[in-house]
Image (tube, rainbow, N blue to C red):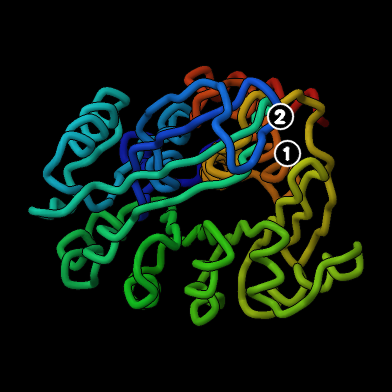
Amino acid sequence: MLREKTADGLYAAVIGGVNMDIGGQSFLPLILSDSNPGKVRTSPGGVGRNIAHNLQLLGLPVSLIAAFGEDLYARIILDSCRGLGIDTKNAVMVPNEATSSYLYLADHTGEMHLAVSDMEICRFLTPETLEEKLPVIRGAIALVLDTNIPAETIAWICRQVRVPIFADPVSVSKAEKLKPVLSELHTLKPNRLEAELLTGIRITDDDGLNRAADALLESGVKQVFITLGREGVLAEDGKQRIRLPALPEVPVNTTGCGDAFMAALVWAYAKGLNVEESARAGLAAASIAMAVSETVNSAMCEEKLLEKMNRSG
């Protein structure tokens, strides 16, 4: 059952990055410093946008707050979001700036090897530009932040709202932005390297993994999901700790798995699920995401997610 809030008014807010994704996947094992035959695709992406897309497919409406330039990429992404039903009325439009782009390279198995992101426009997501968006943010059942936005903006948002905050560290280089606000976070989804950065604890075995999760909870985070790629996830909320394996799938493309995982955590929160059920939802969503070459699997839906969760249980 959904938490006590009318279904008509239930929505999540997402503040983060949008990109035009430009992805290449080789037909054969990658050869560095050489031209690799393969397939190149372009599609709307970005951590924030991908999470919003997955949430919309799971049946939870979304208000996406992101920065856009006045260019072709912005028009393509905004049109795509509106076609999906994602609310973009609170987008921040920045004249004379380029909409973010993300260039990645995957091998023949779908495993991403290298990426370059141009996300300079995110610096315009300042407290000043977001202040008028506060009513929308405060009215959400949950708020998702990704660390593409400035550190001072993350800190400001955490002071301004009491909405449960779900944070995605995005990368080791950007995870540092979350250190000052860990006590304000409801849910944190780092990978192994990001958890090491946030805790200062080396994760080389199960003991290190457990100590890192404990340290994050001691810092004030309500629930932690340390994702481990093919090894699954460690989930903990101070009452329960559970280690679950990844679902046995042959990946086509793993690029969007983390974004799908985070969307499933927000969906699970809206459904009132516990930490174990939430972890199973995240793994199921990641499994669905990796089954296609696109960053977001258009087949994602609540029915398919529940089916995968039941199979993993």
Q: Residue at x 38, y 41 (%)?
A: 49
Question: Which residue occupies the extreme front position in the image?
Answer: 34
Res 187 → quadrant: bottom right
Q: Quadrant of the C terminus?
A: top right
Measure how far apart labels 1 and 2 are at the Cα level. Answer: 32 Å
Side of 11 relative to 279 (left or right): left
**Residue 29: mark:** 2
Mark 1 residue type: Arg
Q: Is the N terminus in the top left, top right, bottom left or bottom right quadrant?
A: top right
Identify residue for label 1: 280
Query: Taking the image as drawn, is residue 261 in sight?
Result: no
Which percent across, then down, holds residue 134?
23, 63
> Who's the residue at 13% across and 51% down the image?
93
- Can you say whether 92 is above or below 206 in the image? above
Q: Nearer the viewer, residue 111 or 45?
A: 111
Q: Residue furthest left?
A: 95
Task: Indicate the amino acid at tag 2.
Answer: Pro
The image quarter containing residue 110 is: top right
- Sequence order check: which comes first, mark 1 or mark 2? 2
